[in-house]
Amino acid sequence: MRQDIQEILFSEEVLTKRIKALASEISKDYKGKDLVVVGILKGSVIFASELIKNISIYCSIDFMAVSSYGNSTETSGVVRILKDLDNNIEGKDILVVEDIVDTGVTLTYLLKYLEARKANSIKIVALLNKQARRTADLDVKYIGFEVPDEFIVGYGIDYAERYRNLPFIGILKPEIYEK
Ligand code: IMP
Ligand code: MG
């Protein structure tokens, strides 16, 4: 598995440190609010776990699953809800946890979907941001790291369901998805 990685961008130590800083910022900003952390399956699971462990205020957690790339490396532009929230979010302060924002199409769609449910607020935290590829006008409140326009895997992020279990973030060798 490791031999498929061209370059390690962020080690486990670097990721953990940054996520702790994000969690403390979030804990401060949401003090006194009714925080619901919404992880987007499956890519955000490791990031979301690390984040909530370090949030020091009351919060609840929920999950959604949306379709994205399938086995390809390009977005289809079609977003499907595969798993919806378990609980009502009316009046709550929603923090959507995403692994990586690329074109922004997925989150733009998701936000519109959630906005219809009368939450008090909806904000986004993304571990990674690939700004070079953004086409949608999307406000990402908290960002862990900027990444180059390369195919990224690890720390929950996959290529064809593989590499999610890598404890770091790296660039996948193009020959893996070009063959
Ligand atoms: P967007 O709708 O183009 O912003 O795509 C967002 C989703 O595409 C992310 O949540 C990921 O699941 C996936 N994605 C985007 N870039 C990458 C990447 O470099 N590696 C793996 N998945 C990616
Ligand atoms: Mg995703």
Image: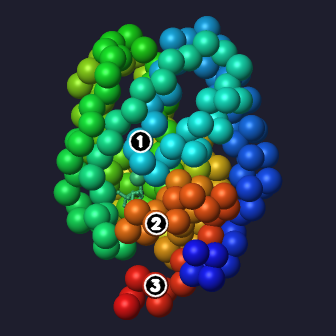
Write the residue at 54% across / 84% down: 173
Query: Which of the two residues, 8 or 144, is positioned nearer the viewer here?
Result: 8
Label 1 SS: strand
Is the residue under label 3 in contact with that under label 2 (CB below 8 Å)? no
Query: Which of the two residues, 43 or 114, is positioned nearer the viewer here?
Result: 43
Amino acid of disc 2: Arg
Q: Seen in the image, is 144 located left or right of residue 71?
A: right
Q: Which mark is residue 176?
A: 3
Write the residue at 54% across / 77% down: 172
| Mark closer to the chain start, 1 or 3 | 1
Task: Tell which quarter ligand 1 is in.
Answer: bottom left
Residue 62's image quarter? top left
Q: CA distance from mark 2 to mark 3?
A: 11 Å
The x and y percentages for residue 54 are: 71, 29
Task: Work out whether 28 lies above or below 113.
Answer: above
Residue 112's image quarter? top left
Question: Does the image show residue 2?
Answer: yes
Q: Seen in the image, is 98 located left or right of residue 11?
A: left
Q: Seen in the image, is 82 located left or right of residue 26?
A: left
- Label 2 belongs to which residue? 162
Mark 2 neighbour density, 10 Å: few (under 14) some (14–19) many (20 or more): few
Label 2 SS: loop
Question: Does the image show residue 171?
Answer: no
The x and y percentages for residue 56 are: 71, 20
Write the residue at 23% across / 25% down: 116
Q: Seen in the image, is 26 located left or right of residue 110?
A: right
Write the residue at 61% across / 19% down: 30
The x and y percentages for residue 121 are: 43, 22
- Label 1 belongs to which residue? 40
| Mark closer to the chain start, 2 or 1 | 1
Q: How is the image coloured?
A: rainbow
Amino acid of disc 3: Ile
